[in-house]
């Protein structure tokens, strides 16, 4: 089976729970998120490091409403939601 993979794709990273402030993104637009051009199949953890995130394990990540791990390979048009899990009682 042959796979035709585009060399570069565009994904959107949406930051919640104040993560954009931790990354010092003063012009971050929450409705648009960060549009990032990456290599097709790049892992989520590498993209997050690329935008400056350091504490990767402390957050939760979702694509199209499904929780994904840091080793998830991204595809064209993916919209990744990043947030700090909340706790309480």
Image (spheres, rainbow, N blue to C red):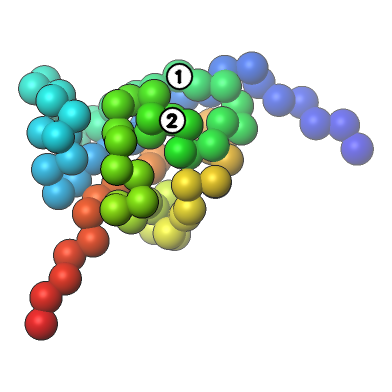
Q: Secondary structure at mark 1?
A: strand
Residue underneath mark 1: 37
Image quadrant occupied by the C terminus: bottom left
Of marks 1 and 2, the one in the foreground: 2
Query: In the rendered image, which quarter is residue 67 located in?
Result: bottom left
Q: Residue at x 22, y 54 (%)?
A: 84
Q: Secondary structure at mark 2?
A: helix
Q: Nearer the viewer, residue 23 or 3?
A: 23
- Where residue 27 sits: x, y (%)? 11, 20
- Category of crowding for the residue at label 2, using alpha-carbon neighbours closer than 10 angstroms: few (below 14), some (14–19), many (at least 20): some
Q: Residue at x 87, y 31 (%)?
A: 2
Question: Relative to 26, does residue 87 appear above or below in the rendering?
Answer: below
- Where residue 63 sits: x, y (%)? 43, 50
- In screen coordinates, is 77 left or right of 23? right
Residue underneath mark 2: 47
- In screen coordinates, is 10 left or right of 82? right
């Amino acid at each position: 089976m042959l796979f035709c993979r585009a060399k570069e794709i565009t994904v959107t990273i949406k930051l919640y729970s104040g993560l954009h402030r931790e990354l010092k993104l003063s012009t971050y637009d929450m409705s648009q998120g960060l549009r990032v051009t990456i290599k097709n199949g790049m892992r989520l953890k590498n993209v997050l490091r690329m935008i400056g995130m350091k504490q990767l394990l402390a957050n939760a990540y979702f694509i199209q409403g499904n929780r994904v791990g840091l080793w998830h390979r991204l595809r064209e048009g993916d919209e990744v939601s990043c947030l700090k899990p909340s706790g309480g009682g």
